[in-house]
Amino acid sequence: MDKSLRRPVIAGNWKMNKTPAETKAIIEEMKPLVANADCDVVICAPYIDLYAAMEAAEGSNIKIGAENCHWAVSGAFTGEISAEMLKAAGVPYVIIGHSERRQYFGETDETVRDRTRAALNAGLKVILCVGEVLEERNIGITAEVVRKQTKVALSGVSKDELANIIIAYEPVWAIGTGLTASPEQANEVCAIIRALIAELYGKDAADRFVIQYGGSMNDANADALLAQYDVDGGLIGGASLVAEKFAKIVEAASK
Ligand code: 13P
């Protein structure tokens, strides 16, 4: 088994933060700091910031993503954005199934599956989020929860399409709380996900499949988390809002 089969991906998830002007400023600040990265670098921003982000990132190694997309191509869905629209706008990545969408906006495993399908159909790269809440961890069903979320989201995804998906394991209790999963806890669940990918698509696909950890990852703990065998990158919330902190995580992934 060889971890070098997988190129790490460090992605920022800005959530509901930053105006277009702030977007331009921080991407300009990040560009020189991450220019020598030996990993993929993605910034996922609010829809309103995507053009500013792409314009500022042009010619650099920073790729831009959205934080969600709808499952339909178009139609009467007030306030929503389709995967086709993102593709047409030139946005390459999209986060799907973030726990905040599941917690606050009624996202289910089935809607996550449908949004994933739409994103793949449009030719986007998907960062698919899974993770257990604290009660589920406490009663010992983390593996079941994460396996079910992953299995439902990937139902109907072919082996070829899998190349356009990465999974972010984000334990909900570690998001925005400062409570990071220990490197061993993060690795344990990322390994469970990799084993499921092997079950569904074969060992070869699993060995190449990128699995990120997310949840209070920062410049101080990134080294230890990223050193784990099954952790191939990070999905970064708070620390991605500060250029130097984000760049330090990118540096840690480039070692
Ligand atoms: P924090 O890094 O702020 O805990 O957020 C993690 C996250 O939800 C990334 O999607």
Image (spheres, rainbow, N blue to C red):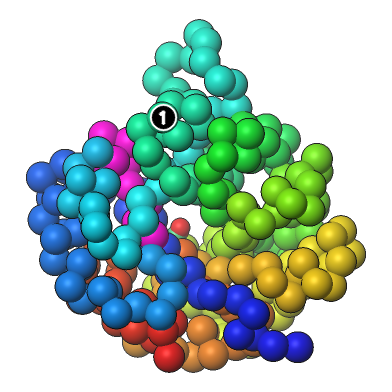
Q: As displayed, is residue 215 above or below residue 149?
A: below
Q: Which quarter of the frame holds ligand 1?
A: bottom left
Query: In the image, is 16 to the left or to the right of 132?
Result: left
* Quadrant of the image containing the N terminus: bottom right
Q: Residues within 10 Å of mark 1 (few under 14, many from 20)?
A: few
Residue 157 x/y as whole percent = 76, 45
Q: As displayed, is residue 145 above or below residue 29?
A: above
Residue 14 x/y as whole percent = 32, 53
Q: Residue at x 58, y 45 (%)?
A: 97
Q: Residue at x 63, y 34 (%)?
A: 121
Query: In the image, is 35 to the left or to the right of 142?
Result: left
* Quadrant of the image containing the C terminus: bottom left
Near-viewer residue (16 or 158): 158
| Residue receiving disc 1 | 88
Q: Residue at x 56, y 39 (%)?
A: 123
Work out whether residue 185 can be spotted. no
Residue 244 x/y as whole percent = 20, 76
Quarter location, residue 153: top right
Q: Is residue 38 magenta?
A: no
The residues colored magenta run 42-50
Mark 1: which amino acid?
Answer: Ala
Q: Disc 1 on helix, strand or loop?
A: helix
